[in-house]
Amino acid sequence: MGEADTPRHVPRHSVKTRCCIVGGGPAGMMLGYLLGRAGVDVVVLEKHADFFRDFRGDTVHPSTLQVMDELGLIDGFLKLPHQRLQTMDGLIGGTSVRIADLRRLHTKYPFIAFMPQWDFLNFLREAGKRFASLKVMMSTEAVDLIRHGEIIAGVRARTSDGVVDIGADLTIACDGRHSTVRERAGLSVEEIGAPMDVLWFRVGRTPDQTENLFARVESGKMMVTFDRGDYWQCAYVIAKGQYDAVKARGLPALLDDVVRMAPILEHGIAEVKSFDDVKLLTVAINRLSRWARPGLLLIGDAAHAMSPVGGVGVNLAVQDAIATANLLADKLTRGCPTEHELDAVRRRREFPVKVTQVMQVVVQNNIIGGALTSGGRPLKVPLLLRLISAWPWLQGIPARVIAIGVRPEHVHSKAAPTSQRRDSVGIMSR
């Protein structure tokens, strides 16, 4: 964003806070909750009026469920509508394989919960209302950074009532893979790449339909389906940059391919009426080498975009938030951490991010990319997957990688005294 894009009129008013979190996604809302719980004066900015966004990651893994348990939130959380996945079965070139079995995990919650992300975020927002030091400003979009020399001193934000300057000792960017804060801070991204993009759409489901298949891979085609109770959530994988070619073939050709791969979808496929019902998700894997500047920290997708392989993006973001609160919450009660102290978050989280991305690249290049470019040749199940499927005890290994991840985080940040909490005060919104 250049100088001409910066709001020219004088801000209507200013707000001062200890910590300003930009972005109300999983990383931002979890971190806001944790800092509010610790008694840190914190404001979370969410540019939309609500969290209702379709086609967002909605897999809540056992690592995140464990965090909710540690925070005393799990009982209320699991009362929200959700579906549970314990086994991941696939069909590769017509051969059935079991990729992972979460029942083999030694964890309190051995399942993946499928829950709309807006329910997850709304739950955190409602739970955070008990903390007097936490404010959430909806319909508030960060458009620029406030600088005092080389130090980031907050953000300038656009609201429905005009422009507001939010001064902050620390600004934390949780505004996703297209981060405005990252761009304004001048931080460069290392692109790792991905061979595919994803078409995301819903297909109607009747109550009597049951199928445990998770992934279907054929020569030149791949699709993943999630049973969401009253509908199937479908992810149709295409080669990178081929969306225009798919559209040129026409919607009937695409839907015919879908039904051929997954006959169970035939009944409800008519709900996909046009390409307006099909969302293109451009897949990217990237990361920053530098996560912090004086007064600024980036976490979640703003620091490292993940592939949808394994559905781990939401949970990596939550893990970043836990680590950030563990390392910084106590320091934030006294002032802004130094750049070296902020960089401790990267030093803690960079290893699990890199390892996870390496594993995603291996799957993309050796299974997904190979299938999409097979040129009509019959597919064979890779040797590793044949071994995992044949030996059930091995199915716990990919289950742990997907469900728990590398170096899972646990809540160690302290809660402020109950005297600093409130019972029913509403959170600031715009």
Image (cartoon, helix red, strand yellow):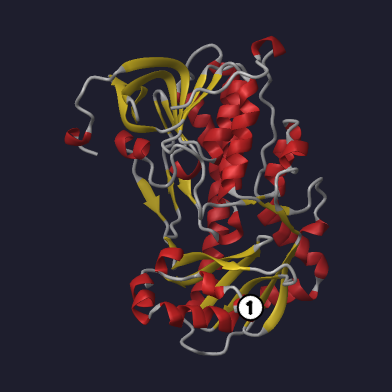
**Vertical order, 399 against 274 (above or below):** above
**Quadrant of the snapshot with the N terminus:** top left
- Tell me the residue at 36%/69% (across/down): 241
Asked if residue 352 shows in the view, the reply is: no
The picture places residue 173, in percent across and down from the top left corner, at 44, 34
Instruction: Tell me which amino acid carries mark 1.
Output: Pro
The picture places residue 69, in percent across and down from the top left corner, at 76, 36
Residue 73 located left or right of residue 375: right
Q: Quadrant of residue 164?
A: top left
Q: Quadrant of residue 216?
A: bottom right
For mark 1, what is the residue? Answer: 382
The picture places residue 328, in percent across and down from the top left corner, at 56, 23
Asked if residue 402 shows in the view, the reply is: yes
Residue 49 located left or right of residue 245: right
Residue 112 located left or right of residue 156: right
- Tell me the residue at 58%/85% (across/down): 379
Say which of 302 and 259 sits in front.
259
**Quadrant of the snapshot with the C terminus:** top left
**Vertical order, 42 against 396 (above or below):** above
The picture places residue 6, in percent across and down from the top left corner, at 23, 31
